[in-house]
Structure formats: structure tokens, C-alpha cells
Image (spheres, rainbow, N blue to C red):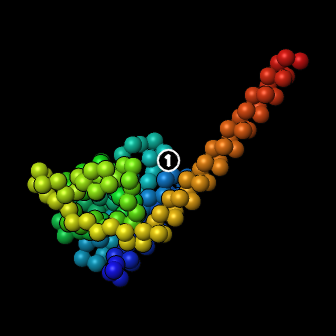
């Protein structure tokens, strides 16, 4: 059973994901909590900022580090709507985050147990506690809806482009 605290903060991460959604970004959101206070927030902005590094978790880590005044985020818990990728899982280990709470797992690219488990590799000098499945249904639904809409939008754009090319070719042959 998920704790009330985990649910509360995952809802905040979902709010961040919805900001990404509004920008047309993959809707992933993240918050970092220290001593009962959100000290870092982030949402995907890779396409908007044209930067590979602008994942929700990286943005939240930067903000939390600024708040703490150190790169070490010991005593912090990260709440993220989708299982972190290799970059974000690695950054969480490097930042010494104590715990990562995950909404939905990512069987294609997740690195907190799905494809790899970077967060708990014994070879590293820090391992991160993992809690998964908090508000899983809501977190998955946001992503599912986004990708359904994206496929519809991409199909419409492709059809429109084909119509324009056909019209152009017809005009050129006349």
C-alpha cells in the first residue's frame, strides 16, 4: 500500500508531467523532497529547449542542488512519473539521492529495474532505495493518452503533406 506522503508527492510530479504535455513534450514530471518540502521540480523539455539533457529528473536535481547548496542530495526522495532512463538513474546515484519513487515502469528504457538497475548496482559506492507503482494508473494514462494523440497528429500531418505533394505534382504537370 502506498503511503499518503508518496501519493501526495507523486501528484505533484504528475502536475509537472502535465506541464510537459502542454508543451507537446513526453509528459514526465519529477519532484525532489527534503524534510517534507519540495526543493526541486522538473518536467521534460528536450524538444522545447533542443537539449538532450533536459529530462524532468535532471532539471529537478539542478534545482534541488541549488536549494541545498551542494551537489549531494542525501536525505532527499525523488518522485518521478516514469522509471528513469540510464542518464537520470546515473544522476540520481551521483547526487546521492536516498530514495526514488516511481509511478510507471518503462520496460523499453527504464534503468531502475526494467532494462537495467543502475540505482542499485553494488559496484557503485551508493545505492538508491526504490519504490515503484505509486499512482501507476494515473502516470501510465497520461503517457498513453499523449502517445495516442501524437500518433493521430503524425498521421494527419503525413496525410496533409501527401495531399500537398499530389496537388503540387498535378499543378506542375498541367
Say whether residue 79 is visible: no
Query: Which residue is pictured at 61% across the width and 48% down the height?
Result: 151
- Quick one: label 1, few (<14), some, or many (20+) residues within 10 Å? few
Q: Judge from the rendering whether residue 83 lies leftward or rightward of residue 77; answer left or right.
A: right
Q: Find residue 114 and report its horizontal and vertical position in percent.
A: 32, 54
The residue indicated by pointer 1 is 48
Quarter of the figure with residue 36:
bottom left
Camera-nearest residue between 64 and 44: 44
Q: Judge from the rendering whether residue 37 lies leftward or rightward of residue 136; answer left or right.
A: left
Quarter of the figure with residue 38:
bottom left
Considering the numbered disc 1 on the image, is that residue within a helix, a strand or a loop?
helix
Camera-nearest residue between 36 and 77: 77
Query: Which residue is pictured at 85% across the width and 17% down the height?
Result: 173
**Which quadrant is the C terminus positioned in?**
top right
**Which quadrant is the N terminus positioned in?**
bottom left
Camera-nearest residue between 77 and 166: 166
Q: Find residue 27 and report its horizontal and vertical position in percent.
A: 48, 58
Amino acid at each position: 500500500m502506498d503511503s499518503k506522503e508518496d501519493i501526495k508527492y507523486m501528484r505533484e510530479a504528475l502536475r509537472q508531467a502535465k506541464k510537459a504535455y502542454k508543451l507537446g513534450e513526453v509528459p514526465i514530471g519529477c519532484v525532489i523532497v527534503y524534510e517534507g518540502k519540495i526543493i526541486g521540480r522538473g518536467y521534460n523539455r528536450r524538444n522545447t529547449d533542443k537539449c538532450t539533457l533536459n529530462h524532468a529528473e535532471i532539471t529537478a536535481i539542478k534545482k534541488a542542488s541549488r536549494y541545498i547548496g551542494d551537489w549531494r542530495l542525501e536525505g532527499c526522495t525523488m518522485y518521478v512519473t516514469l522509471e528513469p532512463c540510464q542518464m537520470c538513474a546515473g544522476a540520481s546515484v551521483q547526487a546521492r539521492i536516498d530514495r526514488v519513487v516511481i509511478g510507471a515502469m518503462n520496460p523499453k528504457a527504464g534503468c531502475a529495474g526494467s532494462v537495467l538497475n543502475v540505482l542499485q548496482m553494488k559496484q557503485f559506492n551508493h545505492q538508491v532505495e526504490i519504490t515503484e507503482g505509486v499512482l501507476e494508473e494515473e502516470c501510465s494514462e497520461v503517457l498513453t493518452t499523449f502517445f495516442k494523440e501524437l500518433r493521430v497528429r503524425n498521421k494527419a500531418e503525413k496525410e496533409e503533406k501527401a495531399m500537398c505533394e499530389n496537388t503540387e505534382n498535378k499543378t506542375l504537370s498541367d
